[in-house]
Amino acid sequence: MDKFWLIKYCNLINLIIIIIIGVLISNNKVDGLGVNWGTQANHKLAANTVVQMLKDNGIKKVKLFDADENTLSAFHGSDIQVMVAIPNADLAAMTDYNRAKKWVANNVTRYNFNGGVDIKYVAVGNEPFLTAYNGTFQNITFPALKNIQTALNEAGLGNTIKATVPLNADVYESPTNNPVPSAGIFRPDITGLMTEIVQFLSQNNAPFSVNIYPFLSLYGNPNFPVNYAFFDGGSDPILDNGVQYTNVFDANYDTLVSALKAIGYGNMPIMIGEVGWPTNGDINANINNAVRFYKGLLPRIAANTGTPLRPGAIEMYLFGLIDEDAKSVAPGSFERHWGIFRYDGQPKFPMDLTGQNRDIYLVGAKDVQYLENQWCTFNTNAKDLSKLADNINFACTFADCTPLGYGSSCNGLDANSNASYAFNVYFQTQNQNLEACDFEGLARLSTQNISTGNCNFTIQIASSGLKTTVPVAFSLITILVYLFL
């Protein structure tokens, strides 16, 4: 009997140890790691669903691009740090202090209670000094930043909530005659402005926020060495005063460190507002490259590797959380495919947020409802094809056809399948409205999944209440018919 109980006792101890190890592993997320949650999608996941997904994956920080009430309400009591944002279009309004004060009251103070929303930062604008904006926001961003931080201070929140400006990496550079990180300076046309902003951030103990995208270095320069965009070597290093730079992220980050040092703020805290890799929309935007990028990035974050000029921990927000099929494609078709999750909240590829590079998947969104299993496909019996091109153009104007582009996942389709993809994505975007699958007789419905290879013909997610809309409407019509017969 004693031997029997000893065996059971040992088994119990082993089980407890296994459980403890499992809990430790599952909770061992990277402390400084957050995600960007953009919501420019035709069919959005419910905010509560997304917040639960963040919690299921141990993600403790999220950066938003607005201060939407429905979104923020979902964070009540979640213990997730939130960065709210003021879009560029609202910066001019924030130059009026009374309006800035009201914005803080409506979008920050109202959530500041026990069990409320843990707002950590306010992002004032989003990359407002991009050269492509031709100075549109240069005269209003700093006044808006000052007003928001002052309003936070006046509300008694300034010690815990900081205003910052997420900037694109094009605000700094190295001279063409000395293109190394240690020679980094702020862009000459905004050096004075950047100096004022950095001084103000420093006075308020707020971080400098910058978005660094190795993918864009590769996308914007056909001669850029591919391996230099990743962290696993294979590229000739850049030598800078005895320091070897083997990847563009380190070189870019340290160029900023040098630029800050050049204006007397070499110890300014730096936060990476956005970093990531897209999975579609360009020949270099694919699953394999995204996996390669994150397998190099995440262990460095977990190990607090830092960079040659700034070793140590880096606060960082991955871009992005979910694909956004309604984003502007002006920068490139890849803009709609930055998510580590698909449009429906399901993980795209293996990803280990602990930085241990285990072959595991993130936890996907739960209880997602989809539209019916039906697709809109090209009608092979159609006789008049003279308007086919016009109808494809129409579909792709109002829906996301970026996977059909060069180097993208559906680039290899034949002519009929190209038409089918365009028709179906429009049909799904229009909530499978039957009138959206006609295209002047060129399309027909199918209950057969027409996806091929890497090209997924999606079934869109159902918006809340969508599936009951048609039956309810049908029932009302039926009642009315009986009443008036």
Image (spheres, helix red, strand yellow):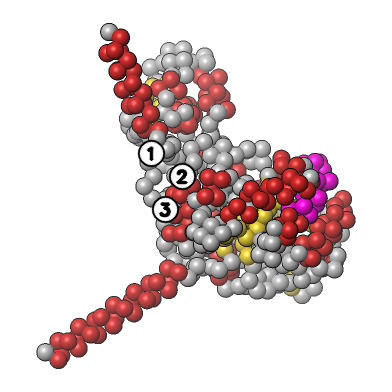
**Disc with the residue nearer the chain's start (2 vs 1):** 2
**Disc with the residue nearer the chain's start (3 vs 1):** 3
- Which residue is identified by label 3? 364
**Disc with the residue nearer the chain's start (3 vs 2):** 2
Question: What SS does tag 1 mark?
Answer: loop
Residue at 38% in and 50% down: 366
- Which residue is identified by label 2? 46
Extent of the magenta region: 133-148
Residue that protrudes farthest toward the left in the picture: 1
**CA distance for labels 3 and 2:** 13 Å
Q: Amino acid at mark 3?
A: Gly
Do the residues under discs 3 and 2 have CB atoms within 8 angstroms?
no
Name the spot of residue 240 as percent of width and height, x first.
78, 69
In which quadrant will I find the N terminus? bottom left
Q: Is residue 434 above or below residue 294?
A: above
Name the spot of residue 256 as percent of width and height, x first.
76, 62
